[in-house]
Amino acid sequence: MKRFLKFYLVLVLATVVTHAAELTNADAVLDFAVAKTAGYESYSATFAQSLDMPNWKSRETGTIAFKRPAQMRRETSIELNSSPQPQQMVMVIGSDQIVWQQATISGQTKVMKTDLKNSPTNSPVATLMKNFSRWKPEALLAKAKDQYTFTLLPATELRGQRMYVLAGELRVTAKPTLREALASTDEGKILHFIGQQDGFLHRVEQRDKTGSNTVYLMEFTNLKLNTPLADSLFTYHLAPGANVIDVSQLPFQLLKLPLADH
C-alpha cells in the first residue's frame, strides 16, 4: 500500500511539474515551436486540407515527406466542387533542385518541370520556392506568426499529446492568402494546435462564428519525425510518353501553376 501511495504521489507531482512548465503566452509558444521544429531533419505524415465556403469547396488528402535541406514529395487527391472527378497531384523536389509537378485530371496526365538552378529571376521560381519552402515545419509557424495576432487558449489533448491552442486574428498589415481573401465575415478566429512535446503544428482549424461549421481545416496525422528517408523517395520517375513542359524559362503570366496557396 505504501509503495502504491509513493508511486501515485510521484505521478501526481510529475503531472503538476509538467503543467507548471507550460508556456503562458502565445509569443513564447511560437518561439518554442519554431526553434524546436527547425531542428528536425525530416518528417513524413498523412496530410489533409479542406475548405468549405459558399462559393468554393475543396478537399485535399494524401501524404507528404520532407527532408532537409530542400527535398519534398507530396502526393494528394484533390476534390473540387467545380470538378466531377478528383485531381491526382504529385509534387517532387529532389537534391538536383528540379521540381516536378504531375497532374492527372479526367484521365489525362500533364507534367511540368522547373530547374531551379537554371531559371531567370523573372520566372515563377520565386513563387515555386515560396510554396515548397512553406512545408518546412518552422516555416509554417513563422508564416502564421507574421499573418496573425495570437492569444493563448487553454491546452487540450490531441492524439495522445497535450497541445497548445492559439487563437489568431488576421493582422491589418498581413497580405492575405487566396483563402483569406475569399473568406466570409462570418468566420471566427483561426486555431493552431501545437504539440507541447514536439513543437509541431498538428492542426489548423477555423469555424464560423456560431462554432458549428468548420470553414477551413489543415492537419497532419501519422506524423513521424527524424526518421530516415531515402533519397530515392525524392526522385521523380517520368511515365513513358508523358508530355513534359519545361517552365524554367517561361514568363510567369503564361503559366497556370496548380499551386493554390490556401
Image: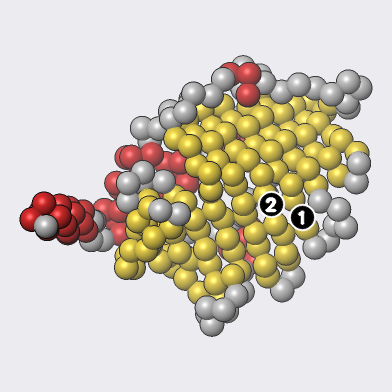
The quadrant where residue 193 appears: bottom left
Point out the tag, 2 or 1, that comes first from the N-terminus: 2
Residue situated in front as seen by the camera: 8 or 70: 8
Relative to 115, residue 147 above or below: below
Relative to 88, residue 9 above or below: below
The quadrant where residue 35 appears: top left
Could you say where residue 121 lies in the image, as x and y percent from the top left?
A: 62, 29
Residue 145 visible in rendering: no
- Checking the image for residue 60, the label placed there is 2
Look at the image and tell me in which quarter the C terminus lies: bottom right
- Checking the image for residue 34, the label placed there is none
Left of 261 or right of it: where is 151?
left
User: What's the residue at 69%, 52% (across, down)?
Assistant: 60
Q: Which residue is mark 1?
A: 79
User: What's the residue at 91%, 39% (across, down)?
Assistant: 108
Check disc 1 and report its element: helix, strand or loop: strand
Estimate how packed mark 1 is, as few (under 14), some (14 to 19) or many (20 or more) residues with alpha carbons within 10 Å: some
User: What's the residue at 70%, 57% (across, down)?
Assistant: 59
Could you say where residue 22 lies in the image, as x and y percent from the top left?
A: 23, 56
